[in-house]
Image (cartoon, rainbow, N blue to C red):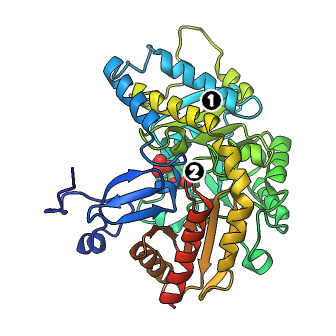
Amino acid sequence: MTTSTNDLSAYWMPFTANRQFKAAPRLVAGAKDMTYRMADGREILDGTSGLWCVNAGHCREEITRAIAAQAARLDYATAFQMGHGAVFDLASRLAALAPGDLDHVFFVNSGSEAVDTALKIALAYHQARGDSRRVRLIGRERGYHGVNFGGMAVGGIGNNRKQFGPGLGTVDHLIHTHDLGHNAFSRGQPAWGAHLADDLLRLIALHDASTIAAVIVEPMAGSTGVLVPPMGYLERLREICDAHGILLIFDEVITGYGRLGAPFAADRFAVVPDLMTTAKGLTNAAVPMGAVFARAHVHDALMTGPENVIELFHGYTYSGHPLACAAALATLDIYARDNLFARARELEPYFEDAVHRLDDAPGVIDVRNIGLAAGIEFKTEGGVGARAYKVFLKCLELGVLTRQAGDVIAISPPLIVSREEIDRLVDTIAEAAAATA
Ligand code: PLP
């Protein structure tokens, strides 16, 4: 079935320049493995795993079958005060996959919901321990934590905040770690910048640790253009949080499920947060779902009081939806059977060498990478993002989907990508950079 394109006006598109798009629509009609099929029949190589989410490639039959079978067996189970087998199975599988004692899993339907859930758990944790002064939430400049009120507040992207009033008052932000003066053209983690974590000490001095509930960061910031944490930076954040009774939350909505060549960034960097938010690759994006992981001490602090009383007044109608659980279980099977996280790690040096062939491409001022993610930053020309948008469009014309974030072209192919496809991705960006110079 193809998509009717007779009237585009009713659909208000998310994070899209609606009028510009509708003047020249880009409509996808189908997908398989690494490839999108457009409504006009053209085939496009997916260089971005959809939106950092289709980690095992598109339309995997095992996932499709699992969803269909689940839909026929149990379409929905009341989520509050009731349960079903698949959601318990999935939570156990995830707890076993996660590092350390991140052993308790709260299900949500998106990355944004995962973030707001984690922030609420952090606040409830301190309150349960009689420490209700700890209400401040610390994010980081250039952080993206989704679009709900909590995530928007701790997020550090001006455009995502400025239309929506003051939001939460009890937040502050660390400085970001992106510094081309020191770290341009880094391969993997940049050597310079661990000390930037000490910015947390400035906020502690300003607000007093006794008012700070949690710090939330993306271990690798994805949406603002693949910002790789400097060596030692996350370790230092962990240390400072521990010293001051502050919970550390890793937002792994992008980095979770193999993007960095390990199950989670927490594994890759050997730093275990107190709470970890995930979504996207959890179900290979086949059904929306997110999962918040909590360490034992966080979970256990809330499992107190009379046993007939709800411990956390929070949840969604579709928390642990059976179809999402089926998709997630089938996805985890594929990741394990095909060893996709290790595969990503093995491919990383090839991917790294390939993307750094763009170091000298016209207009490029930085190339950075880790796992199967890379950011290619262009010099601002004609306004922020204008040049990168041209590169994005040219790549699409040449049959490759990339993601534009400001002046950055980000690529994050599915973990099944071949070496030839990596070359094609990179060669296409080189051609597009030259064509738009
Ligand atoms: N957190 C991070 C780190 C993300 O990258 C995203 C989405 O890209 C989100 C949260 C929000 O996820 P969603 O769009 O599923 O609400």
Q: Nearer the viewer, residue 362 or 272?
A: 362
Q: Earlier in the sequence, mark 2 or mark 1?
A: 1
Residue depicted at x 45% and y 41%: 60
Mark 1 CB lies closer than 8 A to ligand 1: no
Q: Is residue 306 left or right of residue 245?
A: left
> Looking at this rendering, what residue extends furthest in the front direction?
420
In the image, 340 versus 145, the foreground residue is: 340
Along the line of sight, which residue is nearer the eye, 170 or 345? Answer: 345
Frontmost residue, 139 versus 103: 103
Task: Say which element carries label 2.
Answer: loop
Q: Amino acid at mark 1?
A: Leu
Q: Quadrant of residue 102?
A: top right
Above or below, comparing residue 101 to residue 304 in the picture: below
Residue 187 versus residue 54 in the image, above or below? below
Instruction: Label 1: state its secondary structure.
Output: helix
Where is residue 227, by image quadrant? bottom right
Separation of residues labelled 2 and 1 (CA atoms)? 21 Å
Q: Position of residue 392 (x, y in %)?
A: 46, 74
Q: Is residue 67 visible?
A: yes
Q: Looking at the image, which residue is at 35% across and 28% down?
A: 68
What amino acid does circle 2 point to?
A: Ile
Residue 370 vs residue 232: left or right?
Answer: left
Mark 2 closeness class: few <14, some 14–19, many ≥20 residues within 10 Å = some
x, y percent for residue 251: 62, 47
Question: Where is residue 292, by image quadrant?
Answer: top right
Residue 52: x %, y % from top left: 53, 54
Other residues around mark 1 within 10 Å, as few (<14) / some (14–19) / many (≥20): many
State the residue position of label 1: 94
Left-right relation of 106 to 285: right
Q: Position of residue 169 (x, y in %)?
A: 55, 53
Residue receiving disc 2: 416
